[in-house]
């Protein structure tokens, strides 16, 4: 898969580890985040990743800030994005199966790197189930 990743200053090291992990799994990674620990604004990176996914230049997006909250809110402002913020794998999997999420967010100050990897792998492996969930996702996408 082609995966766009974005982060703010709180998540530079975690981003590096997640990028290496994704590449080890054979994914292509587009790094749209900051590589500097100088303070910056998470909405910039949430939007960048979101636009990459919506434009079809990436299959999925991953966004990381201190909590995962701000950057997921930014991504969710872009129509066509369904971003979920997770600190455990169960929600990550269900968000794929039921909500067809296309952006995954988590917090560098909330989860450790190994838990983050587990969340990423579970989310990437899970498939949207369609069926009764498809209409609900359509309803979500109709909210502007
Ligand atoms: C930065 O201090 C912090 O506010 C940001 O990383 C994120 O947690 C916002 O939601």
Image (cartoon, rainbow, N blue to C red):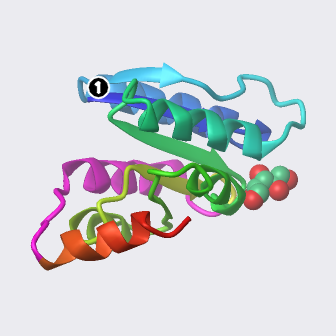
Q: Quadrant of the N terminus?
A: top left
* Left or right: where 114 falls relative to 65: left
* Left or right: where 66 falls relative to 128: right
The number of numbered badges drawn on the structure is 1
Residue 74 lies in the magenta stretch: no
Residue 119 lies in the magenta stretch: yes
> Closer to the camera, 47 or 23?
47
Position of 62 relative to 95 (above/below): above
Residue 25, horizontal then vertical, whole percent: 25, 29
Crowding near the residue tagged with mark 1, few <14, some 14–19, many ≥20 C-alpha atoms within 10 Å? some
Residue at (86, 36) in percent of width and height: 40
Position of 51 relative to 124 (above/below): above
Residue at (29, 25) in percent of width and height: 27
> Closer to the camera, 141 or 120?
141
Residue 111, horizontal then vertical, whole percent: 56, 60
Q: Which residues are magenta?
A: 110-131
Position of 74 relative to 134 (above/below): above
Residue at (35, 54) in percent of width and height: 118
Residue 119, horizontal then vertical, whole percent: 38, 57
Q: Which residue carries the number 1 mark? A: 27
Element at label 1: loop
């Amino acid at each position: 898969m082609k995966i766009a990743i974005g982060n703010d200053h709180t998540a530079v090291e975690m981003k590096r580890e997640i990028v290496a992990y994704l590449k080890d799994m054979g994914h292509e990674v587009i790094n749209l985040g900051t590589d500097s620990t100088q303070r910056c604004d998470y909405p910039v990176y949430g939007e960048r990743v979101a636009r990459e996914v919506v434009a079809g230049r990436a299959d999925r997006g991953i966004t990381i800030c201190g909590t995962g909250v701000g950057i997921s809110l930014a991504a969710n402002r872009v129509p066509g994005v369904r971003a979920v913020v997770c600190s455990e794998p169960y929600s990550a999997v269900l968000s794929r199966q039921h909500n067809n999420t296309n952006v995954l967010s988590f917090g560098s100050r909330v989860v450790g790197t190994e838990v983050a990897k587990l969340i990423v792998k579970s989310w990437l492996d899970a498939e949207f189930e369609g069926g009764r969930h498809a209409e609900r996702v359509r309803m979500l996408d109709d909210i502007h």
